[in-house]
């Protein structure tokens, strides 16, 4: 049940949405899996991520936020 609900449905929604946005944005959304996975584990199971995990997640989040902010500044849709 978990694999069907979490993986298959989530991937189907990701694929349906990916046809509506540019490839770079699809890649950046896919890259958010790395920093968000430890966040969900921390919130749901109280497992503390290591400092290296937090630093790596911050780098990915900064790249995504930088892309969003620069795109908004340029006025790209």
Image: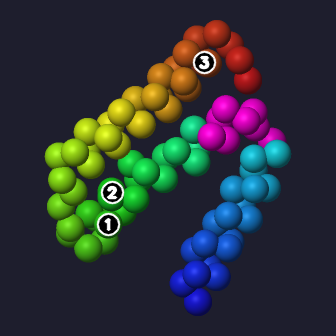
Rendered residue at 18%/53% (across/down): 50
Residue 43 lies in quadrant: bottom left
Q: Are marks 1 and 2 in contact (CB under 8 Å)?
A: yes
Rendered residue at 32%/41% (across/down): 56
Q: How many marks?
A: 3
**Residue occupying the far right of the picture:** 19
**What separation in Å lies between label 1 and label 3 (alpha carbons)?**
31 Å
In this rendering, position of residue 68 left or right of residue 11: left
What colouring style does the render use?
Answer: rainbow
Residue behind mark 2 = 39
Q: Nearer the viewer, mark 2 or mark 3?
A: 2
What segment carries the magenta color? 20-27
**Residue occupying the far front of the picture:** 52
In this rendering, position of residue 77 left or right of residue 47: right
Residue behind mark 3 = 72
Tag 3 or tag 1, which sits nearer the N-term? 1
Residue behind mark 1 = 41
In the picture, the quarter occupied by the N terminus is: bottom right
Q: Position of residue 18 (x, y in %)?
A: 75, 47
Badge 2 element? helix
| Nearer to us in this view, 2 or 76 | 2
Q: Nearer the viewer, mark 1 or mark 3?
A: 1
């Amino acid at each position: 049940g978990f694999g069907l609900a979490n993986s298959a449905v989530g991937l189907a929604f990701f694929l349906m949405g990916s046809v509506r946005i540019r490839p770079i944005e699809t890649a950046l959304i896919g890259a958010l899996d790395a920093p968000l996975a430890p966040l969900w584990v921390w919130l749901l199971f109280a497992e503390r991520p290591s400092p290296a995990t937090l630093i790596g997640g911050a780098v990915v989040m900064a790249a995504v936020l930088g892309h969003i902010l620069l795109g908004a500044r340029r006025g790209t849709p």
